[in-house]
C-alpha cells in the first residue's frame, strides 16, 4: 500500500494559489483600470429592459424557497451516487446494500415531502 506524502499535494495547492491569485488579480485590475463614469441613469435599477415596479423587499412565497431547498437537497444527494457508481465492482455486495439503504432513506424523505404537499405549487 502506497502512502501519500504531503509533497504529493503540492500541485493541487499550487493550482488553488494560481486560481485565487487570478481571481483577485482580475478583480483588482478591473477596479483600477475600468472606467468610472457614474450617472443617475447608470446607477438606476435595471431589470431586463422593464421599468421598475414596486418595492424589491416584497416577500416571496415560502413555497418558492421550499422548492429551491428541496431541489438542492435531492441534487446534492445524487452527487454521492457518482463515486459509488465508479467503484461499484470493487465495493461488492456491501456497497450495493449500503446504496440500497441510502436510496431507501431518500425515498422515505421524498414520499414524506410529497405527502405534506411540498411539491404542490399554488
Image: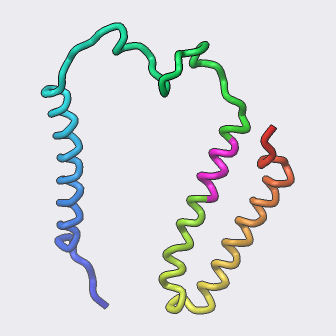
In this picture, which residue range is highlighted in magenta? Answer: 66-74
- Which of 38 and 28 lies nearest the eye of the viewer? 38
Q: Is residue 73 magenta?
A: yes
Residue at image location 62% in from the left, 54% down from the top: 73
Quadrant for the N terminus, please.
Answer: bottom left
Measured from the top left, where is residue 88 in percent x and y? 54, 86
Q: Looking at the image, which residue sits at the far front?
A: 49
Q: Is residue 12 above or below residue 71?
A: below
Measured from the top left, where is residue 108 in percent x and y? 78, 64
Quadrant for the C terminus, please.
Answer: top right
Indicate the quadrant where residue 78 lies. bottom right
Lateral position of residue 87 relative to residue 14, left or right: right
Q: Main secondary structure of the magenta part?
A: helix
Q: Name the image colouring.
A: rainbow
- Which of 64 and 81 lies nearest the eye of the viewer? 64
Lateral position of residue 53 relative to residue 115, left or right: left
Indicate the quadrant where residue 41 lies. top left
Q: Is residue 77 above or below residue 23?
A: below
Residue at image location 69% in from the left, 72% down from the top: 103
Residue at image location 83% in from the left, 47% down from the top: 117
Please tell me how many numbered marks the rendered image carries. Answer: 0
Measured from the top left, where is residue 23 in percent x and y? 23, 44
Q: Looking at the image, which residue sits at the far right?
A: 115
Measured from the top left, where is residue 40 in percent x and y? 35, 7
Residue at image location 69% in from the left, 42% down from the top: 66
Q: Is residue 61 magenta?
A: no
Lateral position of residue 87 relative to residue 106, left or right: left
Q: Is residue 37 above or below residue 114?
A: above
Q: Is residue 25 above or below residue 56?
A: below
Amino acid at each position: 500500500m502506497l502512502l501519500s506524502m504531503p509533497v504529493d499535494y503540492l500541485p493541487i495547492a499550487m493550482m488553488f494559489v494560481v486560481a485565487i491569485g487570478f481571481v483577485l488579480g482580475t478583480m483588482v485590475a478591473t477596479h483600477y483600470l475600468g472606467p468610472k463614469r457614474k450617472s443617475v441613469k447608470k446607477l438606476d435599477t435595471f431589470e431586463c429592459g422593464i421599468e421598475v415596479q414596486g418595492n424589491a423587499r416584497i416577500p416571496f412565497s415560502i413555497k418558492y424557497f421550499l422548492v429551491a431547498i428541496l431541489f438542492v437537497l435531492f441534487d446534492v444527494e445524487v452527487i454521492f451516487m457518482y463515486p459509488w457508481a465508479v467503484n461499484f465492482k470493487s465495493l461488492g455486495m456491501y456497497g450495493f446494500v449500503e446504496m440500497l439503504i441510502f436510496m431507501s432513506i431518500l425515498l422515505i424523505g421524498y414520499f414524506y415531502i410529497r405527502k405534506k404537499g411540498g411539491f404542490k405549487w399554488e
